[in-house]
Image: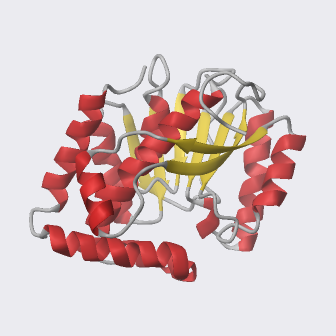
Amino acid sequence: MSAPPDRIAGYVDAAETRHRADLSFAEVRRALQALSSLYVERRERMRTGAALDGAGKRAAFALYYGPLHFLLVREIVRGLGPARRTPRQILDLGSGTGTAGAAWALECRPAPIVEGVDLSGWAVSETRWTLGQLGLRGRARRGNAASAPLPTPPAGVVAAFTVNELGDESRSRLLARLLEAGGKGSAVLVVEPLSRRVSPWWPEWARATEEAGGREDEWRFAVPLPDTSVRLGKAAGLDTRELLGRSLALGFPSRHSEGRPGT
């Protein structure tokens, strides 16, 4: 069961009211340009919390990247097909605004409890707000994505646009823990940008996932974005025509030709 389109639009409208109370559209647009530059050119600053170091960037993240992450994860989950075991709980590692865990949960019947974990206190608060806006049961807390306790199977674990922000040691530790969780019956989903430049570690993770019986996919979706996200993206010079990403998945059906396009 997925959230109907008007519910998603309503969520973004509420987020705009929440984050633009003291900010003009131009201020959020400039912040989005700065945030995009961090993602593309200065990713080393992401580990210091630079992506969320001001009201403008927080608003830009919530109104642009949050909805994009929601829609991309939703379409990936639909493309993969239902997890082999319906999760009773979904853990969202590095939850940001909580949209990745929420997107997956809304595709499950019944919707599982969602738990968000993030180092940022702002992200924890925002995840709680997102879950409430979308009518999901859940909670969020501060914590390290690499070392957060994983839920008891059958559960879901999602790390969307999170692994690339970890250091090498933390990343290796997380890979081992996710493989172990998948082996015990949890469904695991890792989502990252298509660009291999920002994630040179991807081939190692893909190989380990496939050896464990999982799958690697690349995705392109032509999905309408909320009006607010489109306006911000266009004003900031960003391409909003397609959602792009790639995923690693454990505990989902093996690769098949049906459903959404994947490779």
Nearest the eye: 223 or 138: 223
Farthest residue in the right direction? Answer: 211
Q: Is residue 215 left or right of residue 243?
A: right
| Above or below, comparing residue 220 to residue 231 in the picture | above
Farthest residue in the top direction? Answer: 109
**Position in image of residue 260 (x %, y %):** 59, 29
| Above or below, comparing residue 204 to residue 115 in the picture | below
Nearest the eye: 193 or 121: 193
Residue under the point 55% across and 28% down: 78
Nearest the eye: 259 or 31: 259
Residue under the point 56% across and 62% down: 144
Q: Is residue 49 visible?
A: no
**Position in image of residue 210 (x %, y %):** 85, 42
Residue under the point 39% across and 57% down: 65
Residue under the point 35% across and 31% down: 136
**Position in image of residue 16 (x %, y %):** 18, 54
Q: Quadrant of residue 57?
A: bottom left
